[in-house]
Image: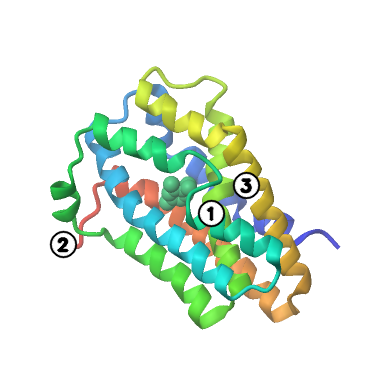
């Protein structure tokens, strides 16, 4: 039997290809992504990452394996990689102030993505919620590995690429894949189906996160 993450990856492949080819990613690599678009992305992603951390903690609270708990609690503290520190630098470099953050409404796709993850935990199960978190690691790691080959001429975009190609982020991704495989092996077939659906839906939201930023999506 193949590991559950292999079939998840296969199911989400068309969505991931669209992410790889999204103009946001292409322009970030080429260095001509408008700074305003990257600023928009960072402000929405701040909301996403805050909830992403919180979800790690909430999922860990529901899981009995000490090893998985340990990984998830560390993830909640942002201890697996330096994404949080890099983001702080970006906010400083781009002069994104607390007042600006306060004044920025959460955009539809960021809101829906986060709601989806909480739904998977509270209406589904810890295993489904863990599956919903996985594309956040895995897709970004694959993007980092693809983009590192040519890099970006813009310093801040290069730092973005470096973060997701880093050893720390790669190790965390591989660990999260193992966790989802472990949870998948313990799940019955209905729950496995739910885990796959959660993964594909998160992949859909990941794709539309680029679109949201690229189009500066608003509610009205
Ligand atoms: C929406 C999203 N997905 C994933 C990542 C990578 N942690 C992120 N920063 N933002």
Q: Residue at x 18, y 48 (%)?
A: 98
Residue 151 appears left or right of 184: left
Q: Secondary structure at mark 3?
A: helix
Disc 1 + disc 3, Cβ < 8 Å: no
Q: Earlier in the sequence, mark 1 or mark 3?
A: 1
The residue that disc 3 covers is 173
Disc 3 + disc 2, Cβ < 8 Å: no
Q: Nearer the viewer, mark 1 or mark 2?
A: 1
Q: Earlier in the sequence, mark 3 or mark 2?
A: 3
Spatial CA distance of label 3 from label 2 is 36 Å
Label 1 crowd (10 A; few <14 / some 14-19 / many >=20): many
Q: Is residue 87 above or below residue 126?
A: above
Residue 141, percent from left and from top: 57, 40
The one nearer the camera, 155 or 218, is 155
Indicate the quadrant containing the N terminus: top left, top right, bottom left or bottom right.
bottom right
Query: Which label number is shown at residue 220?
Result: 2
Q: Nearer the viewer, mark 1 or mark 3?
A: 1
Q: Earlier in the sequence, mark 1 or mark 2?
A: 1
Q: Quadrant of residue 185?
A: bottom right
Spatial CA distance of label 1 from label 3 is 11 Å
Q: Quadrant of residue 214?
A: top left
Residue 208, percent from left and from top: 40, 53
Indicate the quadrant containing the C terminus: top left, top right, bottom left or bottom right.
bottom left
Spatial CA distance of label 1 from label 2 is 35 Å
Q: Secondary structure at mark 2?
A: loop
The residue that disc 1 covers is 75
Residue 23 visible in image: no
Label 2 crowd (10 A; few <14 / some 14-19 / many >=20): few
Q: Is residue 99 above or below residue 7?
A: above
User: What's the image's color scheme?
Assistant: rainbow
Q: Secondary structure at mark 1?
A: helix
Disc 1 + disc 2, Cβ < 8 Å: no
């Amino acid at each position: 039997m193949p590991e559950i993450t292999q079939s998840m990856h296969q199911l989400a492949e068309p969505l991931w290809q669209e992410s790889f080819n999204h103009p946001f990613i292409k322009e970030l690599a080429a260095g001509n992504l408008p700074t305003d678009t990257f600023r928009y992305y960072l402000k929405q992603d701040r909301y996403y990452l805050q909830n992403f951390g919180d979800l790690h903690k909430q999922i860990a609270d529901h899981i009995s394996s000490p090893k998985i708990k340990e990984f998830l609690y560390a993830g909640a503290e942002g201890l697996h990689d330096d994404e949080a520190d890099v983001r702080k630098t970006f906010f400083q470099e781009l002069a994104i102030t607390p007042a600006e953050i306060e004044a920025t409404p959460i955009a539809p796709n960021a809101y829906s993505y986060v709601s989806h993850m909480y739904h998977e935990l509270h209406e589904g199960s810890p295993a489904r919620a863990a599956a919903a978190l996985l594309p956040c690691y895995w897709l970004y790691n694959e993007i980092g590995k693809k983009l590192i080959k040519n890099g970006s001429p813009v310093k801040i975009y290069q730092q973005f690429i470096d973060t997701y190609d880093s050893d720390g982020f790669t190790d965390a991704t591989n660990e999260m894949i193992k966790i989802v495989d472990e949870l998948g092996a313990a799940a019955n077939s209905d729950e496995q189906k739910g885990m796959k659906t959660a993964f594909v839906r998160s992949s859909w939201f990941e794709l539309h996160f680029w679109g949201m930023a690229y189009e500066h999506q608003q509610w009205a």
